[in-house]
Image (spheres, helix red, strand yellow):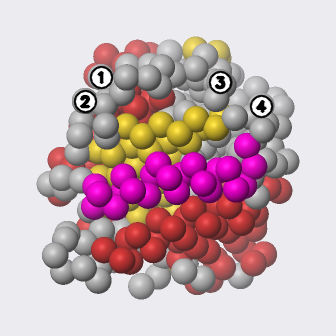
Amino acid sequence: MLATLVSHPACHDHHMPDGHPECPARIDAIANQLLASGIDALLYQRDAIEVTDAQLQRVHTTEYIQRISAATPKTGITFYADDVYLSPKTLIAARYAAGAAVMGVDMIMRGETDAVFCNVRPPGHHAEHNRAMGFCIFNNVAVAAAHAIHEYGLERVAIVDFDVHHGNGTQDIFLNEPRVLFCSSFQYPFYPHTNIEDVPRHIINTPLPATCRSQEFRDAVSAQWFPALENFKPQMILISAGFDAYIDDDMSSISLFEQDYFWITQQLRQLMDKSKTNPQHDQCKGIVSTLEGGYDLLGLGRCALAHIKALAKL
């Protein structure tokens, strides 16, 4: 079964101030790396659909959606809040970014693919139910998880977030939703300075020191995530794929390599494949991964390529 790449040209139309790291070139860095490697020819490629208001409203308040729409400028770029900028087509881009993850869920549930990577922006995992922050407008992975639960009746959806920043928005949205297992690794202490104490058992926070290297990262997630995932037996796995812990990325101090992203993705893929050999448990139907951070363009392309290779078993 072919893995699938979902993107949309509208994701280029969200503009940030000159020199800002969250730029349209991020989309191109991944696409160009896939093309240069020849991997793009081995992927089923689709244009994203636009998310609906009803799908957004499962994780964001109507008032929030209206508020950010009203703040969108007709021309130029305006500062909105906490490193979130709005340009005339920002919300269109954000709707396609969230819609890509929803589309990935739909494709998996229809049996068209079992692994999807969404090459989209703006990212989403910092967006809380009523707050935009940290480059994020709508919480793409949360919208997808809620869609899987409410549209298809899934009872166990796992979200794995290996961005170098904590997925505070995803934790905020699903704090009281035990149908979602949320595993997040992140440099600590670091932005967004989330309260990671006293959280429910379905929230697995894995803080990492700024000195963290490959083996420490692998040991931490192996000890904390994999037992929780095995016990949870997810019917679908969603990934917040941030590549800003890469060694050459100035966004953080953690030093991971593309091989680390291949490794963690391979482990998740093997977990999914293993579930299909055990008739006593529900099968994991597939994996949907959506782009979060990653701002060193060359490193972003290489890390995303490694991630997609592992997703697609190439």
Q: x, y percentage for residue 287?
A: 41, 64
Residue labelled with disc 2: 176
From the viewer's perspective, is the residue at label 1 or at label 2 nearer?
A: 2
Residue holding disc 3: 189
Per the image, is 224 magenta?
yes
Number of the front mark, 1 or 3 = 3
**Image location (x, y in percent) of residue 125:** 50, 36
**Residue 298: quadrant of the picture:** bottom right
Amino acid type, mark 1: Thr
Residue 61 has which mark?
1
Q: Which dot marks residue 29?
A: none
Query: Residue at 44% across / 23% down in the picture?
Result: 197
Q: Who comes first in sequence, dot 4 or dot 1?
A: 4
Q: Residue at x 68, y 61 (%)?
A: 260
Disc 2 crowd, CA 10 A, few/some/many (<14, 14-19, 20+): few
Instruction: Please state the horizontal and vertical placement of residue 248, each as a whole percent of the image.
Output: 85, 48
Q: Residue at x 78, y 75 (%)?
A: 36
**Secondary element at tag 2:** loop
What span is in magenta? 212-234
Per the model, the C-alpha gap separating discs 3 and 4 is 23 Å
Q: CA distance from mark 4 to mark 2?
A: 35 Å
Residue labelled with disc 4: 20
- Say if the magenta span includes residue 242: no
Which class describes the residues within 10 Å of circle 4: few (<14), some (14-19), or many (20+)? Answer: few
Type of amino acid under label 3: Pro
State whether residue 162 appears in this view: yes
Q: Give the mark nearer the N terminus: 1 vs 3.
A: 1
Task: Decide which of 219, 248 is in the foreground and name it.
Answer: 219
